[in-house]
Image (cartoon, coloured by chain):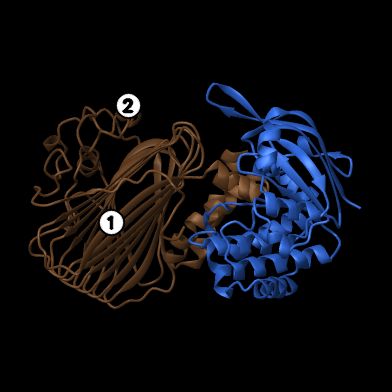
Amino acid sequence: MATLEIHDLHVSVEAEGGPREILRGVDLTVKQGETHAIMGPNGSGKSTLAYSLAGHPKYTITGGTVTLDGENVLEMSVDERARAGVFLAMQYPVEVPGVSVSNFLRTSATAIRGEAPKLRTWVKEVKEAMERLQIDPSFAERNVNEGFSGGEKKRHEILQLELLKPAIAILDETDSGLDVDALRVVSEGVNRVRESGQVGTLLITHYTRILRYIKPDHVHVFAAGRIAESGGPELANKLEEEGYEAYVKGGAST
Amino acid sequence: MAETIPAGSTTDGVIQVGQPTDARVSAPASYDVADFPVPHGREEDWRFTPLERLRGLHDGTAVADGGVRVEVSAPEGVTVETVGRDDARLGKAGKPVDRVAAQAYSSFEKASVVSVPKEMVLTEPVRISVHGEGGTAFGHQLIELGAFAEAVVVIDHTGDATLAANVEYVIGDGAKLTVVSVQDWDDTAVHAGQHTALVGRDASFKSVVVTFGGDLVRLHPRVVYGAPGGEAELYGLYFTDNGQHQEHRLFIDHDTPHCRSNVAYKGALQGKDAHAVWIGDVLIRAEAEGTDTYELNRNLVLTDGARVDSVPNLEIETGEIVGAGHASATGRFEDEQLFYLMARGIPADEARRLVVRGFFAELVQQIGIPELEERLIDKIEAELEASVG
């Protein structure tokens, strides 16, 4: 059973006037089959956690460890992490002109699975996954994320999640910018993957709205670069009513 | 890469009206090299070119030594001749426009003439191989198609050479000519010259210029129309590596009513001091009513240290036209794109290949010669391998 273990993770970015520490000792364990919601105010470091786990070069790890089934994730290149089973659904998916969605998906699936998927079953697999996410078939021939609306980009991210079947899925504010209908479609996609029991999910969000569709097992409040409080789903209800105010103040002083 | 390309600089040209003809060249066109001053490098038409790498082609010091082999193979019915300087058919498509082209015209000793008789439709291409064996040469080739003839001509440049050579295409009424000129030189070669097409009434000319090799390549693809109804499509593809200078200077002279032209050149660059230059001049003269023209240049910069100069220029002397437009954009393969693809398990070199293949795919499809398309894709892959690794 895949387990992602984050221990005392410290991360900095280059800023004017030298490196600025954003993550200040994150501890978190995500097991296959579990769903962890990470909630926090803007600027608390949620997205930094997501991108650091995926290996974005902008972030420098200054301390701590991240392992996936005991393997040192921090030593892996970005593509190695993905092949090891870490998937990041991005808040702002990148446009890649000149590369069609179908070509991209197939190249990616080939890399992740270690062999090219059989063409006939693959076409069917993609077609069905697109139908479930209500993605128009014409998207297969469009360039990756180019000219996609915000909702289309997010559905495209979840399409990849469904096809690549990672061990650990990090969803970085997948709910932001979605209307209720799109949120439901996207959440159903995430739930289909969760129901397999094969994925550990790290759901990063600012709002509690998505938690009505995707029920977390654990809720963590992120503030000032670390987890300020952990609990069950009831913690989300508390945040819904009280907001982040207590953590913003409290976080700054610790 | 469809109509868009990664964010980056855009160099939209200017629309100028009432400029003197061919304002970009520093001297009037002429067959005689003596009519051109030796360029010093600050002239408008020379300012991007490293003259010191032309090995004397521009200043009269280059001396022919015969070290370039030209072989022509053509299907039955096509006449292939080697003729002297005095052959009356030569020089009809147009005069040389710069000193190097004029030097070639003043210095060549023998010219190859390929003639496709009227109404003959070739099913196999004419192949011209220009192979350098380390020598210096001045060359001249003429391809002529009689009325309603159809032909594909592939000119392959390989090996190492210092070559100044002009190619003329004279396309009869209603004829269709596709020419592919591949500059697949060794990285030491220097190649400069002019490709001039004279397009007959209702004739079609399709030019595909592919530049991969060479230390310095500088070509002038040019089109003039002999009569109304002509159509020209000019496609170009270049892959400029470390230290290479590849320059394509196009000119389409719409001097005749109801003609069309469409230009699409795309280039990828990678490595230190890779330098690509694209000049796209289109002139629509007062008498060229009903003209329809569009030109496009796209560049994809894959690494730091490469440089692109892209200058589209449209001069319009009549408002009675169907359409005229141009676009130029230079984009970078960005770190964020690389990250996105890698985050889906795709290794960095594979990601770069994916993007470059996509960038060129549409253009390669427009060429319409499957055998060549395959070869170009293979060559693009090889270029990527060579310089990524």
**Residue B258 visible in the picture:** yes
User: Which shade of the palette goes to chain B?
Assistant: brown
- Which of pointers 1 and 2 lies earlier in the amino acid sequence? 2
Q: Residue at x 33, y 73 (%)?
A: B150
Q: What is the CA distance from the residue labelled 1 to the residue labelled 2?
A: 32 Å
Q: Which kind of residue does numbered mark 1 sit on?
A: His
Q: Dot 1: few (<14), some (14–19), or many (≥20) neighbours within 10 Å?
A: many
Residue hosting label 1: B326
Residue B71 in the image: state x and y as whole percent. Answer: 41, 53
Q: Nearer the viewer, mark 1 or mark 2?
A: 1
Identify by letter the chain in blue: A
**Residue B345 visible in the picture:** no
Depth order, front residue of B86/B177: B177
Q: Chain of mark 2?
A: B
Q: Which kind of residue does numbered mark 2 sit on?
A: Glu
Q: Chain of mark 1?
A: B
Residue B353 in the image: state x and y as whole percent. Answer: 58, 50
Residue A43 in the image: state x and y as whole percent. Answer: 61, 39
A161 left or right of B59?
A: right
Residue hosting label 2: B52
Residue farthest toward the right in the current orientation of the protein = A1
